[in-house]
Image (cartoon, rainbow, N blue to C red):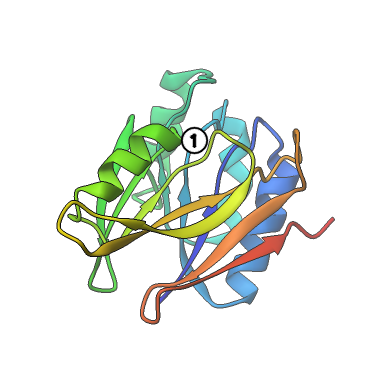
């Protein structure tokens, strides 16, 4: 299974939609948004693309009631998890939060195969050593909105644990 990982869209709906559509063309079957979405209208174009979306909030919160209403209207397509998400996809255990320091701490536990975050607007995928001596992938897709860095998203292959930084097509 492939996953489109995005973050820090900051109300840039066209850029978020372009990244998710590119993810779908690359074979992604779901989307993980690591926060700083801002408003529900940013998500609305994703309904037409049709991939399931998992979303956590960040430090830039918009109208939470509108986001909850859109999730309800989406019939289960858009899933808002709050401050963090603990997911199982393709036999992998994933954790998502907005904050890199929180993500690094969760990766260190060794409880997850992949821990995703945003906030820094810098794309990276590194193996984090765990307290048990193993490693967990720590993934940050950068900023889909091109704020303080290039417009990027991450294509994740959950079977092979491969991660590719992708430019948002404009």
Q: Residue at x 68, y 64 (%)?
A: 166
* 156 versus 103 height, above or below: below
Residue 164 on image: x %, y %? 59, 69
| Image quarter of residue 30 | bottom left
Is residue 39 visible in the rendered structure shown here?
Answer: yes
Describe residue 41's horizontal placement relative to residue 68 as left or right: right
- Above or below, comparing residue 72 to residue 141 in the picture: above
Name the spot of residue 63 as percent of width and height, x first.
50, 18
Which of these two is toward me, 102 or 94?
Answer: 102
Q: Is residue 28 left or right of residue 113?
A: right
- Measured from the top left, where is residue 142 in percent x and y? 62, 46
Nearest the eye: 154 or 42: 154
Q: Residue 62, percent across and down? A: 53, 19
Residue farthest to the bottom, as pictured: 160
- Return the residue at label 1: 35
The quarter of the picture where residue 84 lies is top left
Q: Residue at x 71, y 36 (%)?
A: 12
Is residue 80 visible in the rendered image? The answer is no
**Name of the residue lying farthest toward the right:** 170
Q: Is residue 26 left or right of residue 81?
A: right
The image quadrant where one finds the C terminus is bottom right
Circle count = 1
Q: Quadrant of the N terminus?
A: bottom left
Q: Would you call the spot at circle 1 few (<14 residues within 10 Å), some (14-19), or many (20 or more)?
A: many
Residue 122: quadrant of the picture: top right
* Left or right of residue 93: residue 150: right
Q: Residue at x 47, y 27 (%)?
A: 58
Element type where label 1 sits in the image: loop
> Residue at point 49% right, 21% down?
59
């Amino acid at each position: 299974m492939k996953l489109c990982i995005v973050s820090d869209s900051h109300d840039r709906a066209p850029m978020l939609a372009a990244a998710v559509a590119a993810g779908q063309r690359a074979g992604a079957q779901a989307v993980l948004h690591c926060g700083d979405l801002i408003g529900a209208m940013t998500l609305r174009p994703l309904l037409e693309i049709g991939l399931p979306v998992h979303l956590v909030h960040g430090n830039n919160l918009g109208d939470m009631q509108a986001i909850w209403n859109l999730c309800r209207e989406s019939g289960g397509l858009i899933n808002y998890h709050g401050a963090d998400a603990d997911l199982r996809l393709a036999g992998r255990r994933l954790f998502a939060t907005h904050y890199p320091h929180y993500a690094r701490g969760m990766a260190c536990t060794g409880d997850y195969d992949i821990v995703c975050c945003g906030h820094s607007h810098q794309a990276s995928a590194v193996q984090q050593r765990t307290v048990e001596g193993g490693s967990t992938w720590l993934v940050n897709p950068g900023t889909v909105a091109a704020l303080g860095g290039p417009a990027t998203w991450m294509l994740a292959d959950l079977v092979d644990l491969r991660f590719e930084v992708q430019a948002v097509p404009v």
